[in-house]
Amino acid sequence: MKHEEFHVRETIEVIWELMRYAPEAQGIDLILDIPKELEIETDKRRMIGILNNLITNSIRYHDQSKSKRFVKVSGFIQEDWFHLHVEDNGCGIEPEHQEKVFEMFYRASNVAGGTGLGLFTVAESVDKLSGHIELESTLGEGTTFKIRIPA
């Protein structure tokens, strides 16, 4: 692991800029609730992978029937911990799948492609950063991933 200064908001803006013109991203708004000056010292490569995967999944599993689709990324530091929330109002994850989504090769849905490695990799990266990840999801309403890593 290589720890270095990491500008969270700037990185999310770059990821979004690379994805926003993809056909599946059309009609989805990015809501950023992260101070511009927020920096953390962490493994930049792992954080980029985490952000990229969670934002990509939020786009991939959105609900086209909703008129106001969004991906909201929030971040703040509290008591020496960096908190990152990636929320969407997509299709959500059924309760029986929620405990398994971080397992290798597990796919909760066949709606979009994928190998079942994305959330496994996210969980592994969060673990390597001495952090914690949790999932909150309601079928038909959306999903929020909450990550906490040492700041």
Image (spheres, grey):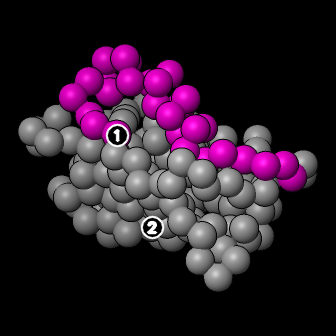
Q: Is residue 50 left or right of residue 106?
A: right
Percent of width and height locating residue 57: 43, 41
Quarter occupied by residue 103: bottom right
- Please give left or right for residue 96 compared with residue 43 in the image: left
Taking depth in this image into account, of 140 and 66 the one nearest to the observer is 66
Q: Quadrant of the C terminus?
A: bottom right
Label 1 vs 2, first from the N-terminus: 1
Q: Can residue 86 be seen in the rendering of this structure?
A: no
Q: Looking at the picture, does residue 102 appear above or below residue 65?
A: below
| Residue at 79% over, 61% down | 128
Residue occupying the point 38% across, 69% down: 136
Question: Is label 2 in a helix, a strand or a loop?
Answer: strand
Per the image, the residue denoted by label 1 is 30
Residue 9: image quadrant is: top right
* Amino acid at circle 1: Leu
Kind of residue at badge 2: Leu
Q: Tell me the tag on residue 90.
A: none
Range of the magenta residues? 3-30
Q: Nearer the viewer, mark 1 or mark 2?
A: 1
- Tell me the residue that label 2 is attached to: 135
Q: Residue at 61% of width from left, 55% of height from top?
A: 38
Q: Gap between marks 1 and 2, in whole Å?
A: 20 Å
Whether residue 122 is situated above or below residue 94 in the rendered picture? above
Residue 47 vs 93, above or below: the answer is above
Q: Residues within 10 Å of mark 2 (few under 14, many from 20)?
A: some
| Residue 4 shown in magenta | yes
Q: Where does the image place residue 96, in percent across and percent down from the top left?
A: 36, 68
* 26 in magenta: yes
